Amino acid sequence: MADEPTRRKRGGGRAGNARRTTSKLPEQMPWRIPVNVDKPTEPLDEDGVQAIHKGAMRILSEIGIEFLNPDACKILKGAGCKVDGTNVRMDEDFVMEMLGHAPAEFTITPRNPDRAIPMGGKHILFGNVSSPPNMWDLKRGKRTGDFEGYKEFIKLTQFFNCIHFAGGYPVEPIDIHPRERHLDCLYEKLTLTDKVVHAYSLGKERVEDVMEMVRIAGGMTREEFDAKPHMYTNINSVSPLKHDFPMLEGAMIHARRNQPVIVTPFTLAGAMAPVTMSGAVTLSLAEGLAAIVLLQVINPGAPCAIGTFTSNVDMKTGAPAFGTPEYMRATQMTGQMGRFYGLPIRSSGVCAANVPDGQAMWETSNSLWAAVQSGTNVVYHAAGWLEGGLIASPEKFIMDCDVIQQVQRYMEPATYATTPEDIAVDAIREVGPNGHYFGCQHTQDRYEDAFYSPLISDWSNYEAWELNGGVWTAERAHEMYKGIIEEFEAPPLDIAIRDELADFVARRKAEGGVPTDF
C-alpha cells in the first residue's frame, strides 16, 4: 500500500547488463494504491460553498432536469418529485436526504482480488484513456481506431502498474460493428487484464452482457456478483440540463445490482454552461446530483461518485480547451463540493494538443495535478489522451505514465519523512564542511531507492544526448511501446473460464448481438 517503500527491479554487473539487453521492458514502480496525504486546495470559502450549493438546489427545484427516460420519470414521481413530461424538479430536503444514503467510500473487486481498488477517502486512482475514435503513433500517424489498436492499448493498461483500472475502450474499434463490439472488447479486456473493468451505459442489452461476462470471469454466482461491486460505469449528462435514455437505463441497472455509477456532466463554460466557472460548476453539480438522487431512490446505498468535466472553450473558435487555469479551478471547486455532499470524486487527465508534444504534457500535467489538488479519487483518461479526446496515442500513454508515477512518488512518505535517519545529523557530522555525500554510508545504504527514476526522461547533458542519437521524448516512448507489446504476457486465467467467456460471446453473436438502427 502507500507506506510500502518503492522497489524497482535493478541489477548491476553482468547479470544486470544481461537483463537489460534481453528485455525491452522498462523498470517501473510496483502496483500500489496511492494515498493523497496533502490537504486539498479549496478555493471556496464557506459562503462560496453555500452559494454554489444553493444555486444547484435552485436549478433542481425551480428549473428542473430533463430525464429522457419514462421509467426514471415514473420512479422519481413516485418518490415525490414534481414531474411535467420529461422535466423533473426536486427540492433541497429531498436531494440531501437521498444523497445521505450514498456511501462515501466503497471498493471494487475485479477477477483478481489483488487488483481491488478502494474509491473514496484519500485514495487516488488512475485509468487509461477512453473512447477516442482515432489513434496516432509516431510511425503511422493519425488513423481510425481498430481492434488491433484497441488490444495494444489494453496491453499497455495491464502492463503499467500505475494504471489502476481499465476504463472504456481506449480507442473505439471501428472495424467491429456496434452490435457486437462490446462482446469482443470485453472478452479481450477480461483476458488481457485482471484489473477493474467498465461497462458503457448504452442501454440494457450491452450492460447486461458486460455484467454477465464480468461474473463469468470472476467465477461468481449471480448472487455473489450482486453482493458487492465488481465493475462500474460512467454516465454523462447531455448539458445543459438533460439525461438521455440509454445512459439512464444502464445506470439504473447498475444501481439495482450494486455496481458503481460515476455521474459526470460534460460542461464547457461559454458553450454548454455559463461562461463563469462557478456558474458552470453549479450547473454541472445540479445535473450530476439529479442522477445520483435517482439511483439512491432505486437502491438506497448504491455506490456512486460525482464527476467533473468542466472546462472552457476558445472564445475565438469555440474549440474545447483543457488543462487551463479555468479547468484547474473548476476541478478544485468540484472536489470541494463533492466532499460537501459526501461523495467520491472523479476528474480527468486531459489536453487539447494534437500530438505528444510540450503542449500535450503541460496541459495534461495541469489536469493531473488539479486532480491531486482537488482530492479527486478516480482520474479518468489519465494516460494516452490527445486532441480533446479524439485521439489515443501509445507514446502519450507512456509519457503520461511517467507523470503519474511522479505523482505517486510525490505522495510516498520517503519524500517527507522526518525520522532521525531522514534528518541525518550523523551523516552531516560525518561529511562535515569539506566532504561530499556520494561516498558516505548514509547515501550508500539508500542510493538505489533514494529518488524517483523516470520511465522516459533523459537526464544526460546535451552532448551525451546528441552522441546517443539525439532521441526526442516521443521517439523514446515509441520504442518503449513497441517493446512492451512485443514482450507482453497476459495475466493468468483458468482455461475453463476463458472457454466459458468465449462460448458466451459466440452465443450472443449468434443471437444477433444488440439491436442497432443500421
Image: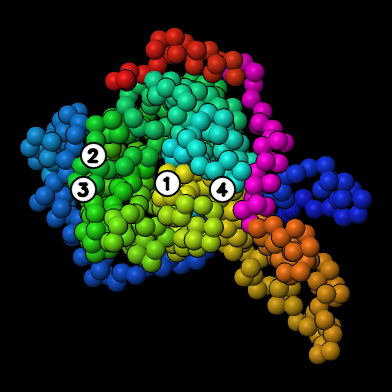
Q: Could you say which quadrant of the image residue 194 lies in?
A: top right
Predominant secondary structure, magenta span: helix
Q: CA distance from mark 4 to mark 2?
A: 31 Å
Residue at image point 20% right, 65% down: 51
Q: CA distance from mark 3 to mark 1?
A: 20 Å
Q: Which residues are magenta?
A: 473-497
The front one of 308 and 137 is 137
For residue 495, above or below residue 481:
above
* Label 1 or label 4, whichever comes before in sequence order: 1
For residue 401, above or below residue 169:
below
- Name the residue beneath numbered marker 4: 397
Disc 3 marks a residue whose amino acid type is Pro
- Name the residue beneath numbered marker 1: 389
User: What crowding class fits label 3: few (fewer than 14 Cα within 10 Å), some (14-19), or many (20 or more)?
Assistant: many
User: What crowding class fits label 1: few (fewer than 14 Cα within 10 Å), some (14-19), or many (20 or more)?
Assistant: many
For residue 348, above or below residue 143:
below
- Name the residue beneath numbered marker 3: 240
Q: Position of residue 75 (x, y in %)?
A: 18, 32
Q: Between tags 3 and 1, which lies in front? A: 1
Q: Could you say which quadrant of the image residue 296 lies in?
A: top left
- Name the residue beneath numbered marker 2: 243
Q: Tell me if 32 is positioned left or right of 59 in this view.
A: right
